[in-house]
Amino acid sequence: MISIKDLSKVFSPNGKNSIQAVNGLSLDINKGEIFGVIGYSGAGKSTFIRLLNRLEDPTDGQVIIDGENITALRKNELRLARQEIGMIFQHFNLLWSRTVRDNIAFPLEIAGVPKQKRMERVDELIGLVGLTGREDAYPSELSGGQKQRVGIARALANNPKVLLCDEATSALDPETTNSILQLLVDINEKLGLTIILITHEMHVIRKICHRVAVMEAGMVVEQGDVLEVFLHPKTEVTKKFVEQIMGDTEQEDALHLLANQFTTGKVVRLHFVGEVTNQALISKLSKQFDVEVNILHGKITQTQKGAYGSLFVHMDGKKDEISNVIRYITSTSVEVEEIDHA
Ligand SMILES: Nc1ncnc2c1ncn2[C@@H]1O[C@H](COP(=O)(O)OP(=O)(O)OP(=O)(O)O)[C@@H](O)[C@H]1O
């Protein structure tokens, strides 16, 4: 649905302080998906997302949304095209002298929607984003989360095909962040809206994205399904982001040492991907088999595409029974890795 081809942006191209913020970036984004772009400060994320609706003009390359080449549009054509690309911002960008209702009505006024229709649409949007009762408040009277809800309603006013989110939760506390992320998921599911978001926080990617691209120095260095990227991060920068969620991989060396302390039984690492929950499996093992199962360490986390993570487990009992347990686990979707120990 969105095709980005060789997109580049150089600031001050002729000056000695010339900066290549985006460098030959290509991506394809599917209709109806939540696509996350993650990168550290300065990676070029903001510039990239602003190129998608031409808040910045590219130096090179193309952005094609639903067959329309955004990069080739003239100013007046761009105004119309932008009605189909909603955007929300880290600092909300609301009009402070207008009420909630009038902020949301603003893009409808610009689009020339008649008053009666405008009012009906605003009421609908207020319900959708959960701001019923706050219609006449001014932005200064709202919490951060409520302000972002106004931003979302305003961005959705003209029924866009795409919603761009520029660090939309970075100014919010963790709880409010969760409620705004949940709202984005609801909107994605209810309206089938394609969402592109940029962030420097991996938990935002984990919670709501279907696919992710990792940006570094203006380029996409890795991309794929969120689960796949979490499971098999290839680049150093991606590994660092995964560590934000799963902890340091150096810990694993310590766990291998720990495994060596057991003189009986077996230490295994169970890899969970998808539906099977750790709780159900572990309790089943203890009930069905004559073995003692102890969790040494582990972390399971939930993504939009299912759970993933791993547990280090020590199993003690008769050798044959332990083999039965391992055979049983292997028959589920959980992978078993045997850890060598003395
Ligand atoms: N308007 C501008 N003029 C000149 N340089 C710019 C401009 N906007 C961004 N840059 C530079 O482009 C590079 C990428 O910046 P950008 O803001 O896109 O990165 P980012 O990944 O969004 O980082 P952050 O999260 O800190 O905003 C940086 O070196 C920045 O200084």
Image: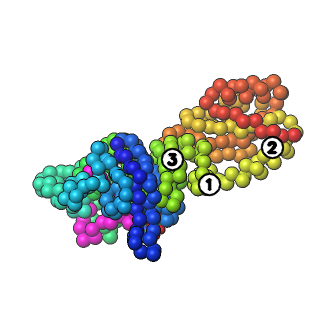
Give yes or no for contact between labels 2 and 3 (Cβ–Cβ under 8 Å).
Answer: no
Q: Distance between the residues labelled 1 and 3?
A: 13 Å
Which residue is pictured at 64% across the width and 33% down the height?
Answer: 334
- Does 93 appear in magenta? yes
Q: Distance between the residues labelled 2 and 3?
A: 34 Å
Q: What element carries label 1?
A: helix
Which residue is pictured at 29% across the width and 53% down the height?
Answer: 70
Q: Mark 3 points at which residue?
A: 223
Left or right: 311 as drawn, with respect to 214: right
Q: Mark 1 points at which residue?
A: 236
Tell me residue 189's x, y (percent): 37, 41
**Residue flagged by tag 1: what amino acid is it?**
Glu
Tell me residue 307's x, y (percent): 56, 40
**Residue flagged by tag 2: what amino acid is it?**
Ala
Q: Give the range drawn in magenta.
A: 83-100
Q: Is the magenta stretch mostly helix, strand or loop?
A: loop
Tell me residue 91's x, y (percent): 38, 66
Figure quadrant of the N terminus:
top left
For disc 3, the neighbor class at 10 Å (few under 14, some 14 to 19, many from 20) is some
Residue nearest the observer in this picture, 150 or 111:
111
Figure quadrant of the C terminus:
top right
- Does 36 appear in magenta? no
Which residue is pictured at 37% across the width and 46% down the height?
Answer: 3
Left or right: 327 as drawn, with respect to 333: right
Going from N to C along the chain, the mark reached first, 2 or 1, is 1
Q: Quadrant of residue 290?
A: top right
Q: How far apart are marks 2 and 1 (CA)?
A: 27 Å
Q: What element carries label 3?
A: strand
Q: Name the residue under label 2.
A: 259
For disc 1, the neighbor class at 10 Å (few under 14, some 14 to 19, many from 20) is few
Going by the picture, which residue comes out furthest to the bottom? Answer: 16
**Residue flagged by tag 3: what amino acid is it?**
Gln
